[in-house]
Each structure stands twice: as C-alpha cells, then as structure tokens.
Image (cartoon, grey):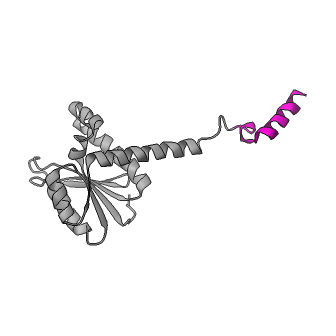
C-alpha cells in the first residue's frame, strides 16, 4: 500500500502515548500488544480524516538481535526500532531528515524529547493534546456517518417531503 505524499508528518512516540492515555494505559496492563493495536487503529482513523502522514514508533531497543522493522498499515507507518535504538533516537533522526521538506509534528509528553525536537524545528504535541484532537476527529467521523446514514429504512416514502408523503398516504387509504 502506498501512502500519498502529503506535506505534513506526525511522528508518534507509541509507548509514550499509550501510557499517556488512560484507556490505553489500562489496556496495556493486561496486554501491551492489544494497546499497540488499538493505538494503531485510532491513528489510522485519525490519518484518514487529517490526511497527514503518520509514523508511530515503538521502542524495541531492548530486543536482543532486533533488526527493527517498518510496516505500512492502513496508510500509517509503524516502526519498531532496532536493538540499542530508542524511539526518541529514531524520532530525532527522522525529524531532522523530514524537517528539510515537510512540516513535522511530534507527539510525546517526554519533556526532554519535546525540547530536542523543537530545537530541530518540529512542533511538539503532548499526549493530552493529541488525545483531544483524536476525540474531536472521532466526533466528526460520527457526525459524517450520521449525515450519510440512510433515512429510516430508505423506502420510497422515507425520501419524500412531508406534503408529498401525506398525499401518497391519503391515496393509499382510499
């Protein structure tokens, strides 16, 4: 799957966000994998509305022999860092590269990381700020679904104005 070239990137410190959002933090207590999957799905929906490139980065620096990986999932990139590389390292390096040609935002609540990425020209977004924007986006999605939802059972009468519907009902009763 190919991601459209868009002039803005959002880099997300995956575990920082998981442990910064109460619902994901609670889910992570029972299954870190489920929390990662939930975050990825949330960000995928968010990307669909925002139309920005998203890279979510998960630390795998403690995985012995880990070579790292990048997966494209529903138009977002999911990165697992290699052994000895933290998500912060990956985000800092990627921010420097992308910042030359794109607007870059980094979602993390790590104070030191925020200072470093802002020094590199990126915009910081805290876990709380990202959550609020995600919630707003989810409300917009729900509103759009309601707007596009067919009226009742989408019968012929459901799509008529009230006056015409009343005329047809009167004819039916005669």
Query: Does residue 5 lie above or below 77 as drawn?
Result: below
Query: From which residue to which does the magenta span run?
Result: 155-174
Q: Position of residue 16 (x, y in %)?
A: 21, 46
Locate residue 150 relative to residue 168 in the image: left or right: left
Q: Who is closer to the viewer here, 65 or 56?
A: 56
Residue 1 relative to residue 94: left or right: right
Q: Quadrant of the C terminus?
A: top right
> In the rendered view, does 86 fall on the left or right side of 124?
left
Is residue 67 at all visible to an observer of this figure?
A: no
Residue 171, magenta (yes or no): yes
Q: Residue at x 31, y 61 (%)?
A: 9
Magenta part, dominant SS: helix
In percent of the image, x 32 and y 40: which residue is there? Answer: 38
Q: Which quadrant of the figure has residue 106?
A: bottom left
The vertical placement of 33 against 107, above or below, is above
What residue is at 36 percent from the left and 67 percent from the top? 7
The furthest residue to the top: 173
Q: Taking 102 as reference, is 80 left or right?
A: left
Residue lying at the far right of the rendered structure: 174
| Image quadrant in which you'd find residue 37 | top left
Name the one closer to the observer, 78 or 42: 42
The answer to whether residue 67 is above or below residue 36 is below
**Quadrant the N terminus occupies:** bottom left
Return the x and y of residue 15 as percentages of the image width and height.
21, 45
What residue is drawn where x is 37% and y is 61%?
A: 3
Indicate whether residue 32 is drawn in magenta: no
- The residue lying toward the viewer, choosing from 5 and 1, is 5
């Amino acid at each position: 799957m190919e991601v459209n070239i868009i002039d803005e990137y959002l880099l997300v410190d995956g575990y920082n966000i998981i442990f910064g959002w109460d619902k994901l933090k609670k889910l992570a207590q029972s299954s870190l994998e489920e929390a990662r999957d939930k975050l990825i799905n949330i960000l995928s929906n968010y990307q669909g509305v925002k139309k920005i490139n998203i890279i979510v980065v998960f630390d795998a620096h403690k995985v012995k022999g880990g070579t790292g990986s990048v997966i494209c999932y529903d138009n977002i990139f999911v990165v697992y860092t290699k052994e000895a590389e933290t998500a912060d390292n990956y985000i800092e390096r990627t921010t420097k590269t992308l910042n030359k040609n794109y607007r870059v935002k980094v979602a993390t609540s790590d104070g030191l990381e925020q200072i470093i990425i802002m020094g590199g020209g990126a915009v910081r977004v805290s876990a709380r700020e990202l959550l609020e924007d995600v919630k707003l986006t989810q409300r917009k999605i729900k509103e759009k679904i309601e707007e596009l939802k067919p009226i009742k059972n989408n019968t012929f009468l459901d799509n008529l104005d009230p006056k015409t519907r009343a005329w047809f009902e009167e004819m039916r009763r005669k």
